[in-house]
Amino acid sequence: FGDVDDPVVDLSAITPPAATDPQSWTRSRLAALNAQFEPRDPQVILQWAVQTFGSGLAQGTGFGPSGVVIMHMLSEIDPSTTFFYLDTDLLFPETYDLKDELADTLGISITRVHGGATPDEQAEAEGPELWNRDPDRCCFLRKVEPLQNFLAKRTAWVTGIRRDQSSSRKKARIVDWAPKCEVVKVNPLATWSRKDVWRYIIENSLPYNELHDRGFPSIGCIPCTKAVDGSGYSRDGRWDGTDKSECGIHT
Ligand code: SF4
């Protein structure tokens, strides 16, 4: 992996002058940034993001392997970065355990973002097991809306999206504009493969969700996540038996 102080990268030359102004993120500016970042290591991209957005930057994670890698990289660049997760109240116990272990191991604090309604309150308002009847509505209430509210006070959002995760993510850009949340979206691992991610985790002795060793390539909420027999994409096993492949925060 490259050195974050790589002298080939002139960070000042690619730092946008008006990072918080949505008007400055034109299509041509994003295209120029993406062309520069395409061959770069994720650490360089994250260093640029930290320098550009400062306290406006936040990494969101569901504690999947990509998120763990980025948390580690960001904690080495600036441990005071805002790290957050969307707590749907329906995550696996192993996921909550991993959150605590990562906070301890990396010396960071991880903010809980929550929609406000418990599953029981949601059942009262929307009927029981909304995730079975209308998973898009359930994801909106428990993920998309809380995310929008949280990011309303931020300027940039770091995610673990990779192009090899699913057919819907094949064209993910490294830097993009997220219109739903009105922030710049930074995907530093867009060009990495699943193998790259696991190599980094092993080489750096990082903790990971033990469910991955039990056949879960991707881990979300308990009602919508299944173990699979082998997997083509890293997100196999989510919303099994439906057309749904995204919760809506990235679409
Ligand atoms: Fe609801 Fe399932 Fe979406 Fe979680 S993943 S918010 S349970 S529909």
Image: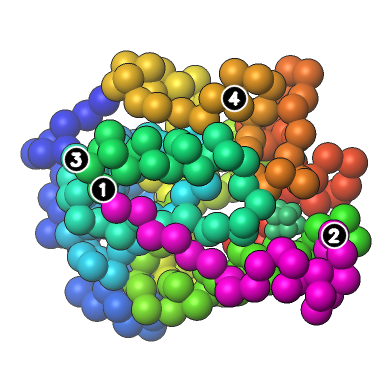
**For numbered disc 2, what is the local secondary structure?**
loop
Nearer-N-terminus badge (3/1): 3
* Above or below 70: residue 194: above
How far from the left and from the top, in percent, is residue 182? 47, 76
Camera-side residue: 233 or 204?
Answer: 204
- Could one spot residue 227 in this view of the protein? yes
The residue tagged 4 is: 212
Which is closer to the viewer, label 3 or label 4? 4
The residue tagged 1 is: 108
Tell me if residue 205 is in the magenta stretch.
no
**For numbered disc 4, what is the local secondary structure?**
helix
- Kindly identify the amino acid type of the residue bearing the numbered disc 4: His
Q: Quadrant of ligand 1?
A: bottom right
Q: Are marks 3 and 4 in contact (CB under 8 Å)?
A: no
How far from the left and from the top, in percent, is residue 139? 70, 63
Q: Which residues are magenta?
A: 109-130
How far apart, in angstroms, are the residues tagged by discs 1 and 2? 34 Å
Q: Which mark is residue 129?
A: 2
How far apart, in angstroms, are the residues tagged by discs 2 and 3? 41 Å
Nearer-N-terminus badge (4/2): 2
- Could one spot residue 134 in this view of the protein? no
Where, by quadrant of the figure, is residue 70 drawn? top left
Q: Are marks 4 and 2 in contact (CB under 8 Å)?
A: no
